[in-house]
Amino acid sequence: METLSTPLPSLPRYSTSLTVNNDHDHDHPVLLHIKQCTNSSQLRQIHAQMLRTGLFFDPYSASKLFAASALLPFSSLDYARKVFDQIPKPNLHSWNTLIRVYASSPEPLQGILIFLRMVHESPYYPNKFTFPFVIKAAAEILSLCVGQALHGLAIKASLGADVFISNSLIHLYLSCGDLDSAYRVFTMIGEKDVVSWNSMITGLAQRGCAEKAFQLFQEMEEEGVKPNDVTMVGVLSACAKKLDLELGRWVCSYIERKGIRVDLTLSNAMLDMYTKCGSLEDAKRLFDMMEEKDIVTWTTMLDGYAKLGEYETAKQVLDTMPRQDIAAWNALISGYEQNGKSKEALSLYHELQQIQIAKPDGITLVSALSACAQLGAMGIGECIHAYVKEQGIKLNCHLTTSLIDMYSKCGDIKKALDVFYSVDRRDVFVWSAMIAGLAMHGQGRDAIDLFSRMQETMIKPNSVTFTNVLCACSHAGLVKEGKTFFNQMEPVYGIQPGVQHYSCMVDMLGRAGLLEEAVEFIEKMPILPSDSVWGALLGACQIHGNVELAELACRHLLELDPENNGAYVLLSNVYAKTGKWDGVSRLRKHMRVTGLKKEQGCSRIEVNGVIHEFLAGDNCHPLSKEIYSKLDEIVVRLKSAGYVPNKSHLLQLIEEDEMQEHALNLHSEKLAIAFGLQYVEVSQPIRIIKNLRVCGDCHSVAKLVSRLYNREIILRDRYRFHHFSGGNCSCKDYW
C-alpha cells in the first residue's frame, strides 16, 4: 500500500459520529466538490488538495473522500483501498464501507478479513450496518461456519432481532444449503418485511421445496404484507418446480388482478414457468406480447422447444435471436443430448465452433462429451479434450467426470484412468465415474480397490457409487463381495437401497447362475420389484437357458410394462436357445398381432470424425457394395478356419440352412466390422457401439476375426464391453 513520505500538519479533530452533520459541508467547501465528481481524475485532484491542506486527516472528511472513492460509479476498489489505508484512524462508517464494497466484489473473502481487522485493531464494535455487509461476504464464499460465528456475534451484540441482519442471515443459510437454520431465523423475526418473505419464498422454491414456498406466500397474504414483483418471481419458480400449470396460470392472473408491476424479470419468470410446465402455447402467446426481450427471454423459449422435442422450432429461435450467447447454444445442444439425439448435438457443437459467435464453455463441453460417450465417438471426444488443454480450461469436477465417462464408454479405460489421476480435486461423482468405467470393462477387483481408496480420502459414497460398485461385482462374478457391499449400505453408510441396487443384486446372482437365489431375493424385497428387477432376471435366464423362470420373469415384466418389446425378444431368445421353436413362433405371432416390433439392431463406428450407422440387413450406406464384398470375404475365411454359425441365436424358425446363415450374417455389428476392416487404420482398434445385446454368434465371429486379421476389436453393447485381440476376449463368454 502507498504511504505518505512527508508528514503533513493536521487540522483540529472533528466528530467521529456516523451521523452526518450537514453544517460540516459548509465549513469545508472542498467536500462539496466530492459529490460533483464525474470521473476518477477529479476525485484524485480533490484527494491531493485534501492532503496538502491537511483536511484528509480529519476522520469525517477522510470518510467522505473514501466513501466516494469506493461507491461512485467510476470507483476503483484498488484506489479506494489505498485511500483507506492512508487514513490514520478510520471511523466506523469507513470500516463498514470497505467491508461493503469487498462483499460485493470478486474478492468477498477480503471483506471478512477487513471485518476481523476492524474488531482487533479499531476501537469500534460492529453495529447494525456492519453485520449485513460481512454476512453477505460469508454468503458469497458459501462459508457456513463463518456465517454461524457472525450470527453468534450479532446475538452477543443484542442485534439478533434486527430485521436487516436477520434477512442477511436467511440469505446466508439458504446459500449454504441450510434450510432449517434459515427458517428458524425467519420465524424469529418479530416484524417481517417484504424482503424477509421474499428471501424465504425464493430460497425454498430454488431448493425444491415448492409446496412450502407456496404455503409461505399464502401466510404472507394473511399477515397483510403486500407481495411485490420479487415475491411473484419466487412463487412462479415454485410453480415451475411443481410442474403445476394450473397453479401457474392462477399466479399470472393474480399478478394482473393485484396490479403488481411486471418488469422484464417477472415476464421471464412467467415464460419460464409456462415452458417448464409444458405449455408452449401459453409461452408463445406471452413471448409475442412482450415489448422488451433479453437473452434470457429468447433462451427460455429455445429451451422450452428443445425439451419438448421440437428441435426444428428451437433451431429457428436460435437463428432468429438478435444476439446469441453460449447459454442459448447450450440449451439446444443439451436438449439434443439429453433426448438421445447425440449426432445432432455434436453437429450443433461443430457448427458453434465454425461460426465462432460464442465460445464453448464448461456446460457446452460436458454436453458434447456426453454425446460422444453415447455414440462411442472417441475421436471427437479426444478433439474436445485437446480443445480443453489448448484453451487452458481448468478441469472442474463436472468436466473431469465427463471425460472419464467418455473415455470409459468409448473403450479406452487407460485414458480414463489418466484423466482420473491427472486431477487433484475429485468429488464423489469423479470417483463414481471411474468405478463405473472399471466395472463396465470387467475390472471388478480394480473397481472395488478404487472404492476402498475413495473412502480413505474421506469422500462419502452416494447411491450412484453403490450402483457402480454392485455392477462391478456383477460383471466380475464377485458375488460374495457384492452381497457384503449391499448389506453394508444402510447400516454402515446410511444409504437406503433403491430399485437400481436391487436390480444389480438380481443381475449379479443371475449371471452367476444362482437363479433360484435371485428369485428368493426378489420375493424378500421390502419394495415392489420394478420392471428393471424382472428384466435382470429375464436376462440371466437367457444366459443360462432357464425357460421356466424366464416365463415367470417375462410375465411379471409385462404386467408392469405391457408394451415392452424387449421382454418378448429376450423370452424368444431363451426359446430359440433351447430349441423351443413353437414358443418362438407363438411370440412372434403375438407381437405381429399386437403391433409390437422388435427394436432394430444398430451398430455405430466412427472413422475420421464421421459416425457411420448400420442397421441389420442395411444396404443404405454409400459403400454398401464394398462392405458386403468384404463380408463375403470374411465368411469364406471364417469357414476355412472351422467356424460354424450358431443358429440358436435366430429369433424365428428358418428351415433352410443357407437362409439361416444369411440372416446371421446381416447382423449390424458384422457389417460394422467389415466396414472397420476396410477403413480404420491398422494401427487403431475397431470400435463399435451396438444398441442391443451382442448375440453369441456375433461374439464368436468378432473373436475369430480379431485373430484372422490380426486386429483389435472393441465392441460395446447395451450391457458391457467385449475386447477382442489376437483371438482372445477379455470379457466372460456368457453364451
Image: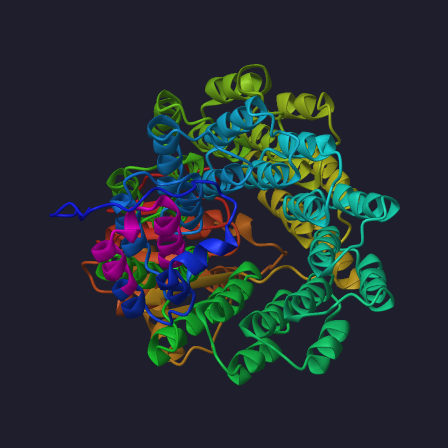
Q: Nearer the viewer, residue 403 or 481?
A: 403
Residue 204 falls in image quadrant: top right
Q: Nearer the viewer, residue 90 or 564?
A: 90
Is residue 25 depicted above or below 538 in this figure? below
Q: Is residue 563 left or right of residue 496?
A: right
User: Which residue of the protein is positioned furthest toward the left in this rendering?
Assistant: 5
Q: Nearer the viewer, residue 391 or 347?
A: 391
| Magenta span | 46-70
Q: Residue at x 40, y 77 (%)?
A: 351
Q: Is residue 522 left or right of residue 673?
A: right
Is residue 238 depicted above or below 471 in this figure? below
x and y percentages locating residue 158 in the rendered image: 60, 25
x and y percentages locating residue 162 in the rendered image: 64, 35
Residue 577 falls in image quadrant: top right
Q: In this view, does 548 lie to the left or right of 703?
A: right
From this viewpoint, is residue 309 visible?
A: no
Is residue 729 depicted above or below 28 in this figure? above
Main SS of the magenta segment? Answer: helix
